[in-house]
Amino acid sequence: MSDRLAVLPQYLLPKRALTQLAGALAGARAGALTTGVIRWFVGRYGVNMSEAAEPDIAAYPSFNEFFTRALKPGARPLVDASLICPVDGAISQFGAIAGDQIFQAKGHAYSTTALVGGDAALATRFENGHFATLYLSPRDYHRIHMPRAGRLARMIHVPGDLFSVNPTTARGVPGLFARNERVVCVFESDAGPFVLVLVGATIVGSMATVWHGVVNPPRPGMVREWRYEDKPIELAPGAEMGRFLLGSTVVLLFPEGPLAFNPAWAPGGAIRMGEAMAD
């Protein structure tokens, strides 16, 4: 079966309704029922609870609180590198941006302008730059951290579809990451600007940042923007910047210039927060 045929049912599913229902259920505090669901999830996906700050499954009053669990201190040591990996997960793609085109999968690319919600001036800052697309699976740690020190400049919530995000949909849904709902976080740093884009998906109840809290819902159906130039929000390398309440994908953008990605990286390879992303 072709990838386009495999994703055809997703065009027909009531993805937003399913996502809203999943968000409500994940936030419910249902006692033993919640504990039973978490226990099943841990077994089904092989979640390593030994590295969690709270390893007792019964201690989590809701599925969301389990899903966004903190890790024990020292569980993710930070390497000394120009860029550190911001998440646990797998590498979808990474490399050079060809003009304004980001590689998604064979036969598919999308523009930086579309990704950041239509802001051509912002997208121009990353023309011929570099990108990395990192996928978080259900078993992974779902907090997102800073790849380098940065000063927050803007946050943009872009409404969109809620296709599931996985290798099949990346190959079968054109412009997937610039099509799904997303939160675009723009930072300035001593090494230039960079962007972290939190991409939603089917069943992803919401996304949150440490400076704002939950960004979505609400979902008003229009682009929303917050500016922070006059607020001193600075985050250190490895500091938490956000989290998925049920997870998806992070896309990072960096400007044109020398950037040597970790030579051990390859599409499909496993990654851990805190390891070297670039020398």
Image (spheres, rainbow, N blue to C red):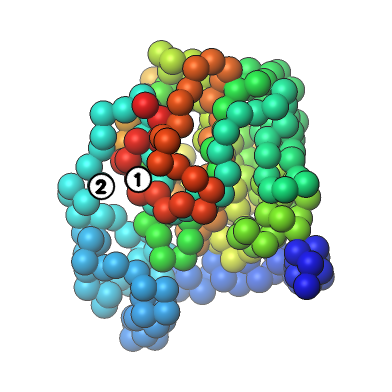
Picture residue at 72% right of the left edge, 23% below the top:
99
Picture residue at 67% right of the left edge, 62% below the top:
168
Q: Position of residue 123 (x, y in %)?
A: 68, 24
Residue type at mark 1 is Met
Picture residue at 39% right of the left edge, 82% below the top:
40
Q: Position of residue 4 (x, y in %)?
A: 80, 63
Query: Dot 2, crowdedness within 10 Å: few (<14), some or many (≥20)?
Result: some
With 12 as the anchor, is 204 left or right in this view?
left
As helix, strand or loop, the secondary structure at mark 2 comes to: loop
List the residue tagged with mark 2. Answer: 76
| N-term-proximal mark, 2 vs 1 | 2
Dot label at residue 138 = none
Looking at the rendered image, the quarter that the N terminus falls into is bottom right
List the residue tagged with mark 1. Answer: 273
Q: Nearer the viewer, residue 239 or 134?
A: 134
In the figure, residue 131 lies in which quadrant?
A: top right
Looking at the rendered image, the quarter that the C terminus falls into is top left
Picture residue at 57% right of the left edge, 33% below the top:
95
In this rendering, is residue 63 above or below 74? below
Q: Residue furthest left?
A: 73
Q: Residue furthest front?
A: 263
As helix, strand or loop, the secondary structure at mark 1 comes to: loop
The residues bearing labels 2 and 1 have C-alpha atoms spaced at a distance of: 6 Å
* Residue 149 visible to an observer of this rendering: no
CB-based contact (under 8 Å), mark 2 and mark 1: yes
Residue type at mark 2 is Arg
